[in-house]
Image (tube, grey):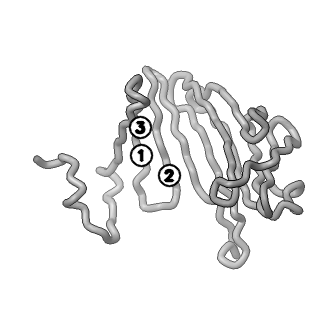
């Protein structure tokens, strides 16, 4: 039937979406206990990913994008931005930052410069995580936060790859 999922009918290639009539919905069953639903709305063909989360009457939008700048082809910023925006109600959100280096072999050393700025270093690689969400160290190698976002409010996180020796000055 029309609209029925059938992976065998999808062929490889480049597709153009008609943005006023396109949206992607998804469902995930969490260990047989809860069903989570989401919506990829902004299907414009950009490299911005928007995911909408709904919990009862509350709704929030998660926006992920790579920060670009003039001259970025030669000197990329190497920064991923994540924005959580409240759409309606108050949406409870959680963040868990669990960086692993060298294909998951190396758990990093995490240094907190402030509640909203952290450096993770492992092997010969580094990441800096900064924003307006206070994160707390958990089990030595992870950062956690729980917060609510209301309609019209935004929370921001920026993740940047750095050489370990330059981690202190990044972002």
Does 94 sit above or below residue 73?
above
Does 58 sit above or below residue 50?
above
**Are dots 1 and 3 in contact, CB under 8 Å?**
yes
Rendered image quadrant of residue 122: bottom right
Helix, strand, or loop for circle 3?
Answer: strand
Residue 134 visible here:
no
Does 160 sit above or below residue 86?
below
**Are dots 2 and 1 in contact, CB under 8 Å?**
yes
Residue 140 point in image, percent of width and height: 79, 37
| Residue pointed to by mark 1 | 40
Residue 25 point in image, percent of width and height: 35, 42
Q: Residue at x 36, y 37 (%)?
A: 27
| Residue pointed to by mark 2 | 49
Q: Residue at x 81, y 43 (%)?
A: 117
Residue 38: numbered disc: 3
Q: Disc 1 to disc 3, how far (Cα)?
A: 7 Å
Helix, strand, or loop for circle 2?
Answer: strand
Q: Residue at x 66, y 27 (%)?
A: 146
Residue 29 point in image, percent of width and height: 38, 32
Q: What is the crowding at mark 2: few (fewer than 14 residues within 10 Å), some, or many (at least 20)?
A: some
Q: Which is nearer the N-term, disc 2 or disc 1?
A: 1
The quarter of the picture where the C terminus appears is bottom right
**Are dots 2 and 3 in contact, CB under 8 Å?**
no
Q: Disc 2 to disc 3, how far (Cα)?
A: 12 Å
Q: Which is nearer the N-term, disc 2 or disc 3?
A: 3
């Amino acid at each position: 039937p029309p609209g029925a999922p059938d992976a065998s009918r999808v062929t490889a290639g480049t597709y153009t979406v008609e943005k006023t009539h396109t949206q992607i919905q998804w469902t995930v069953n969490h260990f047989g206990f809860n069903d989570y639903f989401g919506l990829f709305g902004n299907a414009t063909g950009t490299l911005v990913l928007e995911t909408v989360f709904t919990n009862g009457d509350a709704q929030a939008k998660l926006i992920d994008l790579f920060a670009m700048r003039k001259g970025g082809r030669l000197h990329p910023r190497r920064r991923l931005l994540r924005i959580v925006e409240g759409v309606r109600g108050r949406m409870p959100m959680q963040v868990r930052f669990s960086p692993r280096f060298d294909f998951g072999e190396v758990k990093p050393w995490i240094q907190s410069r402030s509640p909203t700025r952290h450096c993770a270093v492992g092997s010969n690689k580094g990441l800096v995580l900064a924003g307006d969400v206070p994160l707390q160290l958990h089990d030595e190698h992870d950062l956690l936060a729980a917060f609510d976002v209301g309609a019209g409010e935004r929370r921001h996180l920026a993740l940047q790859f750095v050489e370990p020796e330059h981690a202190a000055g990044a972002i």
